[in-house]
Image: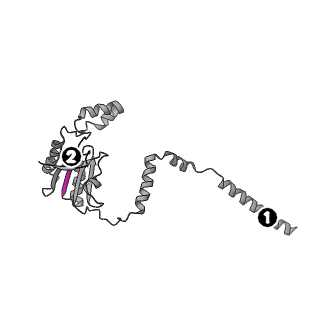
């Protein structure tokens, strides 16, 4: 009798553990994981796939945070501009500061950091043809914001200057002059102005 009871005990224990293991394995996936997967946009998925490909071939982790060629570019955020390809910028060469219209005034904060903390001593101001900030007005943009987002959103922006410009080359000249006259930009920093043509990919210099 003692031997039979000793034999049954491990069998019962084994049955209990096995059934518990089956229930754990058959439980549905965690809701948090499923939610994250459902919320991923096509663009997020593309970013992840593209980054994995990029990271497999990445060998530039030892680059300095100081730009090797000691210059900065201020240009527009326009999706038709690829600064690295169009202007021959290799990874680690320069700072590329982008905003709507390629505004030097808006870029001043970044330029001060670039020059004072990261040793750059030259600035290229590069605007482009068919820019959305050319020929528009603050009033037009504010009206659009109020129509689409409401008065509270407009009030939050609190009279922001959208920095539009009426003429392309004059806009470049004005930005170059602004940087040259700014006390926040050292006298030794060389500033030049350029226009990039989105239709033929060419760039030309704009005289002062």
How many other residues sit within 10 Å of disc 2, few (<14), some (14-19) or many (≥20)? some
Residue where numbered disc 2 is placed:
105
Mark 2 vs mark 1: in front:
2
How many other residues sit within 10 Å of disc 1, few (<14), some (14-19) or many (≥20)? few
The magenta region covers: 119-126
As drawn, the label of residue 9 is 1
As drawn, the label of residue 28 is none
Residue found 69% across the figure and 56% down from its top? 22
Who is closer to the viewer here, 15 or 122? 122
Is residue 115 on the magenta stretch? no
Residue found 72% across the figure and 56% down from its top? 19
Q: Secondary structure at mark 1?
A: helix
Residue found 28% across the figure and 34% down from its top? 141
Looking at the picture, does residue 142 appear above or below residue 28?
Answer: above
Q: How many marks?
A: 2
Is residue 125 on the magenta stretch? yes
């Amino acid at each position: 009798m003692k031997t039979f009871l000793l034999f049954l005990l491990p069998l019962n224990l084994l049955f209990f553990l096995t059934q518990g293991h089956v229930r754990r394995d058959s439980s549905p996936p965690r809701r948090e994981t499923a939610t994250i997967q459902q919320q991923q946009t096509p663009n997020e998925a593309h970013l992840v796939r593209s980054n994995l490909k990029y990271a497999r071939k990445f060998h530039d982790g030892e680059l300095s945070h100081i730009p090797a060629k000691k210059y900065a570019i201020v240009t527009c955020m326009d999706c038709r501009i690829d600064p690295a390809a169009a202007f021959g910028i290799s990874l680690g060469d320069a700072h590329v500061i982008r905003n709507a219209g390629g505004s030097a005034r808006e870029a001043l904060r970044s330029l001060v950091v670039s020059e004072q903390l990261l040793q750059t001593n030259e600035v290229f101001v590069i605007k482009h043809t068919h820019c959305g900030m050319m020929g528009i007005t603050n009033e037009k943009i504010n009206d659009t914001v109020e129509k689409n987002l409401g008065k509270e959103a407009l009030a939050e922006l609190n009279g922001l200057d959208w920095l539009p410009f009426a003429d392309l080359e004059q806009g470049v000249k004005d930005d170059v002059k602004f940087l040259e006259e700014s006390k926040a930009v050292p006298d030794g920093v060389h500033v030049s102005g350029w226009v990039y043509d989105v239709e033929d990919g060419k760039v030309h210099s704009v005289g002062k």
